[in-house]
Amino acid sequence: MNLAVRNIYTIAKREMGGYFTSPVAYVFIVIFLILAGVFTFPLSDFFARNEASLNAFFFWHCWLYLFLVPAVGMRLWSEERRLGTIELLLTMPVTGWQAIVGKFLASWLFLGLALALTFPMVITVNYLGNPDNGVIFCGYLGSFLMAGAYLAVSCLTSAITRSQVVSFILSVVFCLALVMAGWPPLNDMLSQWFSSGVINAVASISVMTHFSQFQRGIIDSGDIVFFLGLIFFCLFTTGVVIRSYRAG
Amino acid sequence: MIKIENLVKLFGSKRAVDDISFTVGKGEVLGFLGPNGAGKSTTMRMITGFIPPDSGSIRVGEFNMLTDPIRAKQTLGYLPENAPLYTDMTVYGFLNFAAELRGLRGADRKKAVHSAIETCFLESVIHQNVDTLSKGFRHRACFAQSILHDPEYLILDEPTDGLDPNQKHEVRSLIRNMGKRKAIIFSTHILEEVLEVCTRTIIIDRGSIVANGSPAQLKAMHPDFGSILITVRNVTEAELREKLKTLAAAAQIESVKNKEEVVTLRVYPKDKNSSGLAAQMAELAIQSGWKFDELHTDDGRLDEVFRAITLPDTVKKSKKDGPVITVNV
Ligand SMILES: Nc1ncnc2c1ncn2[C@@H]1O[C@H](COP(=O)(O)OP(=O)(O)OP(=O)(O)O)[C@@H](O)[C@H]1O
Ligand SMILES: [Mg+2]
């Protein structure tokens, strides 16, 4: 195996192990599943809609992730700083980006696992009716990408501070901004003062705008590029933050 | 060989490390001394590639830490100050993780981990979670991590901090033995440790090197180095002084103690580096029939030398604060 891949794998494996040796991982997954269920069924009148789709399920994801993803990502680098293990990790023969990618991938995979555990939803709608499973798959893909984007933001905020709490709050604020930029009520309000060009520009940086395409079953390369670009940008900036932290 | 040249590190406007240069070769154990905040850890962090220097160069063996950090780091083992550890792992898991990052695989990794566990006496805690370990065991677990890959170069920031006396002893002899094949830099606040393990000592203060030499050389900087203490019974101090003054090799004589007919004097030689004075004094004592309790050559005190060269002059209010020593590095 290539050395870089090997290092990323080792770091990701350790990070993943860290989730599952504490009860936090299980608590998180349970809360995630309960909330996903609560949002989908009672809050959205899933059955009253009388349609065989997971629209009601995916609709809430940008809000659901707003708190849950920062909870997963807040410790990524702040904990390394607090414990001082960052000194250990970065004096090993690994590069900064290998460490960043390794840690990020582990958490993303963990979120992916939590998301995958919602599969009973898919079974339920397939049992009740004849949903378009292609659309459902798109929804999952979009949701996973969106989780990655939120996570990258949390990764960045966790590198800024050694306090998990501060990291969490900053991350929620940033992610909220990313959602709100495309939130229809806000856009409607802004349209009173700004031209539609401005509104569209603002909305185009919102995860909501891009995720809604996936929900409709449309996989647009532009949307994928948006999420991956956002992830890349945040991880790159994380690298810059960590470098400047080391420089003192 | 580790070679650092003109290393400078600024934190804001504070010069934490101010133009430090030295080399450490294989077979050397370099003791790094200095008061709190002198810049020892900062220097070590730069050598290990954790923080970049503002200027200067760092070579580890044939690799330049600033331009070729990965290969330079491969040859280094590092025990950071306060021995940081991932608290959510077991000792065994942690060492395996470190070994994997060091590029050790399969049977090699197993062997390396087990030999480090043995060397650092960790058998009893290998399956214990790191956050339940006592401080000494944490330190040993982190130390184990630094020697896993049998590195050519070892940087140890206060390796004996928090260890019990037996473990301190073990770690010291370990360092001494490893120092025969490796180049080792270690920092400490325990001066006996320096005398026991180091082949060379560097004292830094406020970011600069203030002394560099073997422990014996540093001790020899003490003003009392080479002076001879004599304790005699049933002779008056005046008589004693009178006789000692006649010795060819004796210079100044100072009284140390005079109580209940036991007199202790300190005699300084004219030439610090010749051993003639002690012999002359012994001969004189025997000729004169003195009952002497003690005749011993002072070989200097590292703690007082350390104090003298690292205390700012403003703090030295009286002679009690230690002798005045001027150093040229
Ligand atoms: N990240 C940092 N930011 C700002 N100042 C720092 C930083 N790290 C170290 N310093 C300062 O640099 C100086 C040297 O610190 P350093 O940790 O190297 O000292 P030391 O010799 O290891 O001391 P000790 O014996 O207490 O371990 C201190 O004044 C310290 O406050
Ligand atoms: Mg220190």
Image (cartoon, helix red, strand yellow):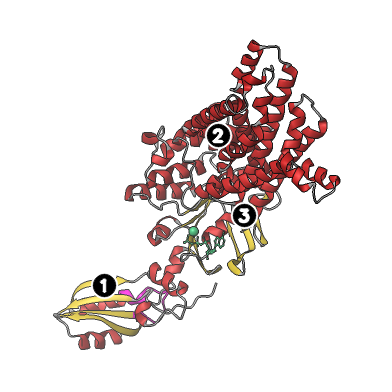
Residue range (magenta) = B268-279
Per the image, label 3 sits on a secondary structure element best described as: helix
- Relative to residue B193, is residue A149 depicted above or below? above
Q: Residue at x 47, y 65 (%)?
A: B34
Residue B183 place in picture, x, y as percent: 54, 51
Whether labels 3 and 1 belong to a single chain: the reply is: no
Q: Is mark 3 within 8 Å of ligand 1?
A: no
Q: Is residue B234 above or below residue B147?
A: below
User: Which chain does the numbered disc 1 sit on?
Assistant: B
Residue B140 location, x and y as percent?
Answer: 42, 44
Q: Estimate how packed mark 3 is, as few (under 14), some (14 to 19) or many (20 or more) residues with alpha carbons within 10 Å.
A: some
Instruction: Please state if B302 lies on the left or on the right of B21 as rendered.
Output: left
Q: Amino acid at mark 3?
A: Tyr
Report the residue marked by disc 3: A245
Q: Find residue A83 and name its label.
A: none
The residue carrying mark 1 is B295
Mark 2 belongs to chain = A
**Mark 3 → mark 2, Cα distance in angstroms:** 23 Å
